[in-house]
């Protein structure tokens, strides 16, 4: 059973990586939305239409949980492939990747960082971890993370109820 799971995990990981290779090549085929020679961030409407058509052609319904899992898995590999081709500093300068919270970045480090910026970075990092089958989180880390998410959810619920 374990061997089958390992084989399936390996196949899925390879598939994500293969799709990511194609996505990176597509990003080099389209100009960026602000006149960049390549759409390394994947933000131009032409690029997004091409990717959406490819996922549609593969039968991936964008409104399902599996679609989210696929895009997270592919995004993980896209980032890694871009990091192999370009330096981290280059990708940060181009706005392709954000400075990582793993480097000890805090909201107080930048006057321009908003809580939404921090949340975006955190979500991206958590999605990367979730897509990496090699990562096994510690229980205490998951408990602390869950507690923080529940606190944020309560704050959101309170704000939504207060606005109604």
Image: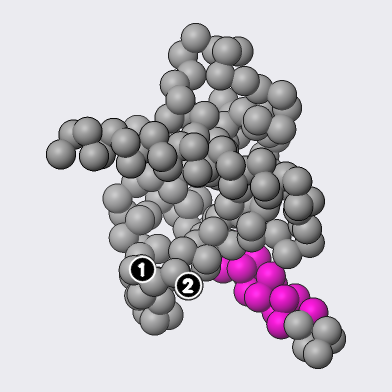
Residue 94 relative to residue 101: left or right: left
Report the residue at 57% width, 13% height from top: 108
One can see residue 91 in this view: yes
Q: Main secondary structure of the magenta part?
A: helix
Which residue is at 66% across, 75% downward?
12
Residues at marks 2 and 1 touching, judged by CB atoms closer than 8 Å: no
Q: Residue at x 33, y 41 (%)?
A: 157
Q: Report which residue position mark 2 lands on.
A: 66
Q: Is residue 29 magenta?
A: no
The quarter of the image holding the C terminus is top left
Quarter the N terminus occupies = bottom right
- From this view, report whether residue 141 is shown above or below residue 89: below
Residue 29 % position (x, y):
45, 54
| Residue placed most toward the observer, 29 or 105 | 105
Packing grade of label 1 (10 A; few <14, some 14-19, many >=20) is some
Name the spot of residue 44 as percent of width and height, x first.
34, 46
Give the crowd class for mark 2: few <14, some 14-19, many >=20 residues within 10 Å.
Answer: few
Query: In the visual, does 164 lie left or right of 78?
Result: left
- Residue 25 placement (x, y as % from top left): 54, 58
Q: What is the count of numbered marks?
A: 2
Single out the residue that lies furthest toward the top: 111
The front one of 142 and 113 is 142
Does 3 sit above or below residue 50? Answer: below
Residue sitting farthest toward the right: 3
Q: Secondary structure at mark 2?
A: helix
Where is residue 90 drawn, in percent x and y?
Answer: 63, 30
Q: Which residues are magenta?
A: 6-22
Left or right, 1 with reference to 151: right
Between marks 2 and 1, how big is the CA–CA gap? Answer: 8 Å
Which residue in the structure is indicated by mark 1?
Answer: 62
Whether 105 is drawn above or below 160: the answer is above
Q: Residue at x 64, y 60 (%)?
A: 131
């Amino acid at each position: 059973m374990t061997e089958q799971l390992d084989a399936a995990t390996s196949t899925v990981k390879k598939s994500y990586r293969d799709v990511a290779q194609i996505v990176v090549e597509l990003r080099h085929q389209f100009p960026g939305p602000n006149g960049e020679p390549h759409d390394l961030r994947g933000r131009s409407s032409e690029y997004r239409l091409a990717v959406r058509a490819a996922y549609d052609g593969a039968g991936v319904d964008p409104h399902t949980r599996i679609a989210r899992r696929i895009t997270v898995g592919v995004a993980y590999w896209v980032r890694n492939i871009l990091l192999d081709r370009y330096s981290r500093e280059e990708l940060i300068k181009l706005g392709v990747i954000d400075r990582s919270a793993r480097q000890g970045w805090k909201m107080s480090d930048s006057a321009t960082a908003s809580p939404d910026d921090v949340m975006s970075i955190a979500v991206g990092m958590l999605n990367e971890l979730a897509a990496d089958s090699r990562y096994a989180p510690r229980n205490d880390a998951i408990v602390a993370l869950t507690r923080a998410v529940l606190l944020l959810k309560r704050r959101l619920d309170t704000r939504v109820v207060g606005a109604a």
